Amino acid sequence: MRRSLLVVLLFLACDRSTSREPVRVGAKSDEQSAAIAENVARRLELAGCVVERRMRMGDAVSVGRALRDGAIDAYVESHGVALTQILRRKAQPGPAAEAEVRIAYVKENLVWAPPVGVGDYAVVFRKNVDDRCRNASRTFMATGSMLDAR
């Protein structure tokens, strides 16, 4: 779980030399989503990011809409829930669901990060968050580690 979460955080991490605009991390109303989102928010802060939390925002459809509308920049979602409730497509097994969700979200300038290691949860975020930290993302892709990216 730790390595997967580091991947997610790197994609979300803000470069200290660029924007100090907060990364708005949202969460659905359930306990597991809120706990994972809080963990993501804390790790972002440790990496030097300004984070604004928007927890317990409602169900998957509501939070997914908030992401698309720009009210939040990132949140934690399940591949299965994204596929069936947000995209309204037929359920599929794990890897097929993840692939279909990734493709659908890319078309909307959203990034579906690698799984965080809890169930089939992953962080999904707006492309502009990745644009604010492109150098950190490239560093990670080259080294496979975020430890020196701070």
Image (cartoon, grey):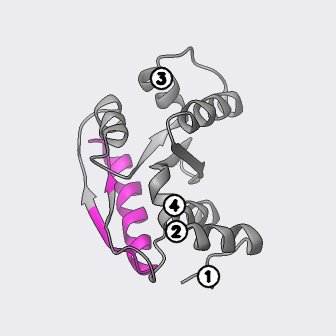
Which mark sits nearer the N-terminus, 4 or 1?
4
Residue 110 at x, y percent in the picture: 50, 43
Question: Does residue 45 show up magenta in the picture?
Answer: yes
Task: Give how far apart the Cα atoms at labels 4 and 1 are.
Answer: 20 Å
Task: Give how far apart the Cα atoms at labels 2 and 1 are.
Answer: 15 Å
Q: Say whether residue 125 is visible.
A: yes
**Whether label 2 touches label 4, CB < 8 Å:** yes
The residue tagged with tag 1: helix, strand or loop?
loop
The label number, if any, that marks residue 87 in the structure image: 3
Badge nearest the viewer, 2 or 1 = 2
Q: Residue at x 41, y 81 (%)?
A: 48
Task: Give how far apart the Cα atoms at labels 3 and 1 are.
Answer: 35 Å
What residue is disc 4 on?
131
Residue 105 at x, y percent in the picture: 54, 35
How packed is label 3: few (under 14 Cα within 10 Å), some, or many (20 or more)?
some
How packed is label 2: few (under 14 Cα within 10 Å), some, or many (20 or more)?
many
The residue tagged with tag 4: helix, strand or loop?
helix
What residue is disc 2 on?
133
Looking at the rendering, the stretch of residues picked out in magenta corresponds to 25-52
Q: Residue at x 44, y 72 (%)?
A: 43
Measured along the vertical axis of the image, is residue 149 above or below residue 22? Answer: below
Of 59 and 140, nearer the camera is 140
The label number, if any, that marks residue 147 in the structure image: 1
Which mark sits nearer the N-terminus, 3 or 1?
3
* Residue 6, image quadrant: bottom right
Q: Say whether residue 119 is visible.
A: no
Q: Specify the amino acid type for callout 2.
A: Cys
- In which quadrant will I find the N terminus? bottom right
Q: Specify the amino acid type for callout 4.
A: Asp
